Amino acid sequence: MTYTQNFTVVGDSLALSAIVAVIPILYFFWALAAKRMKGYLAGLTTLLIALMLAVIAFGMPTQMAIMSATHGAVYGVLPIGWIIISSVFLYKLTVKTGQFDIIRNSVVSLTEDRRLQALLVAFSFGAFLEGAAGFGAPVAISAALLVGLGFNPLYAAGLCLIANTAPVAFGAIGAPIIALEGPTGISAMEISKMVGRQLPFLSVVIPFYLIVIMAGFKKAFEVMPAILVTGITFAVTQFLSSNFLGPELPDILSALVSLLALAVFLKFWKPKTIFRFSAEQEMAATLAVNEPSGHKPSYTGGQIFKAWSPFLVLTGVISLWGIPTIKQALTGHYEGTNVVLSTINSIGHAFSFIPNVPLLNNKVINAAGETIPAFYKLELLGAAGTAVLIATIITKYIVKISWKGWIVTFGETLNELKFPIITIASVVGYAYVTNSSGMSTSMGMVLAKTGFLFPFFSPILGWLGVFITGSDTSANLLFGNMQKVTATSIGMDPVLAVAANSSGGVTGKMISPQSIAVACAAVGLAGKESDLFRFTIKHSIILVIIVGIMTYLQNGVLSWMIP
């Protein structure tokens, strides 16, 4: 049995079919924003609605729709859920062993100002983790760090999701950009150049935007020097690296430059007043260390280095996992002659399981008449979550926790994250059902028919793709070629359209169900996904409109910016 995707299922009307396809999205918005439903319930019911529409409206065989849901659910657990579990586990180890108190003190020694801490942790450090690992690790770890510093959990999660806008397009060693080269045939370097001529404008704005959300315009202007140092150093490095080095390093380099620049700047400049959240004003004197005496402990450089070591180890291991040849070996796909890599390849192959998805593999026929392969991709050793787990094993010896304590902490982490993992599995399952049934393509084709306004809607297509899939890489694979074909048909430069898909997609990351679930899990707000969604949705819409206007202008009066 095969299934041929049909994009005009309602009266041969693409528009009406797209309206049917958008029902699960509208339901999910309603469930979280209006009904304030718990995330896992919203995810499961959205998946159920998508399955019903795929079968009843789009004519997909029931068993194929169900297997598509399992395909997505497995991907939601590995690699995405696995990253969250191991990342939160690493953070909990530092808390249990008292090392996080030292980390907190070291950040506070730079600045006790909440605005500047958000720039350091949410924006710069989060961008570094995005560049090295991607998926949920940046938001999970940076949000947990902010909570440990004393931030309100909802604020910490929301700020980290919004801050994550700047680096997403170049995340995971450039994976979203590199992924576009295959389906579009456009050089990854050319796409990197174009994205590098769009996102730096957002990168300059995001630090200021973050502080305005936190404290308002007046308080934001009080730290404008620090905001400018952070945003400008990040944006300039992002532009230069994306245009002259390629898509792999912009996030890592930009994050390091902005982090170091701000840290050095704060040695010579301090804001006139220290900003804290209103609930903290009465305990301002003891906020940093939570000691009634107000005494601030002094830690040696060695103690501070030890406390940060788990995250330094994390960075090193994840960066190692991201090197292309090593990643190939870890997943059992290395074909070179290096003895060490060949040995790792053998181990990686033994821990890689890529079975066909029964009843689905090569059974779905897309618009081009091609069958779509479907595999459960269980590359255990090569998963980024495994890299983080290895960091936790090394951390066990650094922080000197017993194996019993290590195992107990891991068990506590699993118990805390059971509902967020259900949420992630269900919403990724929804994404896969939407894609395999043709529902997402129906929505995309409607936006592609907006004619001369398409340059404005081009980023919105990427935004929709990331909302559905939770990944800029997946959204680029989903809509990248459609962007190219549509742009060519209306006389728009296809490089601009393809890049806009990625640039617009970054603004959808903060509202994607997967990201919301990850952020809530990291800060202990499981079940409060609706509150976080309400916090981020307006900012997501504002930012995608900005990218849409920018793309529209670059297609016309600013066409000289296209490489």
Image: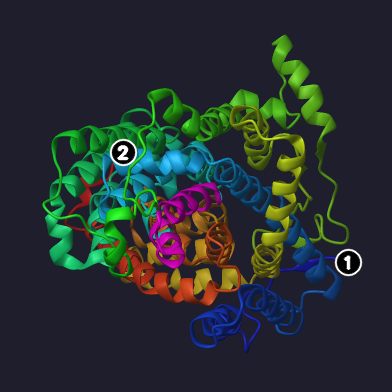
Occupied quadrant, residue 6: bottom right
Secondary structure state at the residue bearing disc 1: loop
The overriding secondary structure of the stretch rendered in magenta is helix
Q: Is residue 262 left or right of residue 154?
A: left
Q: Name the residue rendered at 47%, 33% in the picture.
A: 308
**Residue 223 in the image, given as x and y percentages of width and height:** 16, 52
Which residue range is magenta in the image? 136-160
Q: Earlier in the sequence, mark 2 or mark 1?
A: 1
Occupied quadrant, residue 264: top left
Q: Name the residue rendered at 33%, 69% in the picture.
A: 279
Which residue is identified by label 2?
A: 238
Q: Is residue 53 left or right of residue 168?
A: right
Q: Is residue 144 a member of the stretch shown in magenta?
A: yes
**Residue 401 in the image, given as x and y percentages of width and height:** 67, 35
**2 or 1: mark nearer the eye:** 2
**Residue 38 in the image, given as x and y percentages of width and height:** 61, 78
| Front residue (pair 442, 333) | 333
Q: Amino acid at mark 2?
A: Gln
Which residue is identified by label 1?
A: 1
